[in-house]
Amino acid sequence: MVIIPLGREEVNPDKPDSEGRTPLTYAAWEGHEGVAKTLLGRKEVTPDKLDNDGQTPLSFAARRGHEGVMRILLEREEVNPDRPDNKSRTPLSFAARCGHEGVAKILLGREEVNSGKPDDGGQTPLSIASQNGCKGVVALLQSHKAVTPSTI
């Protein structure tokens, strides 16, 4: 159903709702890879668009553990894999909070990602994963070259 309306020129595929979220944000949130690809096929769609909280479609995909959507978004040059939201939370900190090892691994494979970056509360991805008992993410972060005991 999504593809038919998107084919019409008068449909704005990047129009945000009252929370600043776009159709791509919702596709990322729900893990709809096909919809994300279709939306990104339109030149009007901004793949790294911020919502009212400063979160991007990548942040939403990371929070929900949608690795496929993450990969699709990260193919786009304009997507910043380390972009913080209004509370300085990054896609990696969302993945750490929710225990999404696959997402954390994807993000840690990107040189732009600062694995020790604290949020506004001073918590790093490692401290967040530790607090939430996410052993797999803790192990990934500890094995990452940028994480040291001082970044806990």
Image (cartoon, grey):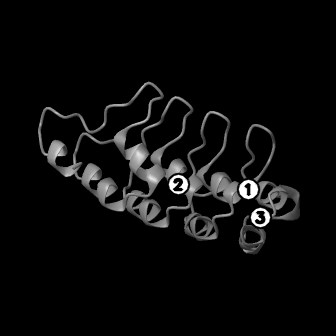
Q: Dot 1 corresponds to which residue?
A: 125
- The Cα–Cα distance between marks 1 and 2, rounded to whole angstroms, is 14 Å
Q: Residue 12 in the image: state x and y as whole percent.
A: 23, 34
Q: Residue at 43% x, 66% y: name it.
A: 68
* Marks 2 and 3, the one that precedes in the sequence: 2
Q: Position of residue 34 (x, y in %)?
A: 30, 60
Mark 1 crowdedness (10 Å alpha carbons): few <14, some 14-19, many ≥20: many
Judged by depth in the image, the label closer to the viewer, 3 or 1, is: 1
Residue bearing the label numbered 3 = 147
Query: At 44% from the left edge and 24% from the top edge, which residue is drawn?
Result: 18
Q: Is residue 47 left or right of residue 114?
A: left
Name the residue beneath numbered marker 2: 81
Disc 3 + disc 1, Cβ < 8 Å = no
67 over 17 or under it: above or below: below
Does residue 138 appear left or right of residue 14 in this picture?
right
Q: Nearer the viewer, mark 1 or mark 2?
A: 1
Asked if residue 107 is positioned above or below residue 27 in the image, the reply reads below
Q: Position of residue 110 (x, y in %)?
A: 55, 65
Badge 1 amino acid: Pro
Q: Amino acid at mark 3?
A: Val
Q: Which of the image's four quarters has the C terminus?
A: bottom right
* Measured Cα–Cα span from mark 3 to mark 1: 9 Å
- Extreme residue in the right direction: 149
Counting from the top left corner in percent of width and height, residue 85 is at 60, 38
Q: Is residue 95 left or right of residue 131?
A: left
As helix, strand or loop, the secondary structure at mark 3 comes to loop
Left or right: 65, with 120 as reference point: left
Of residues 122 and 69, the one nearer the viewer is: 69
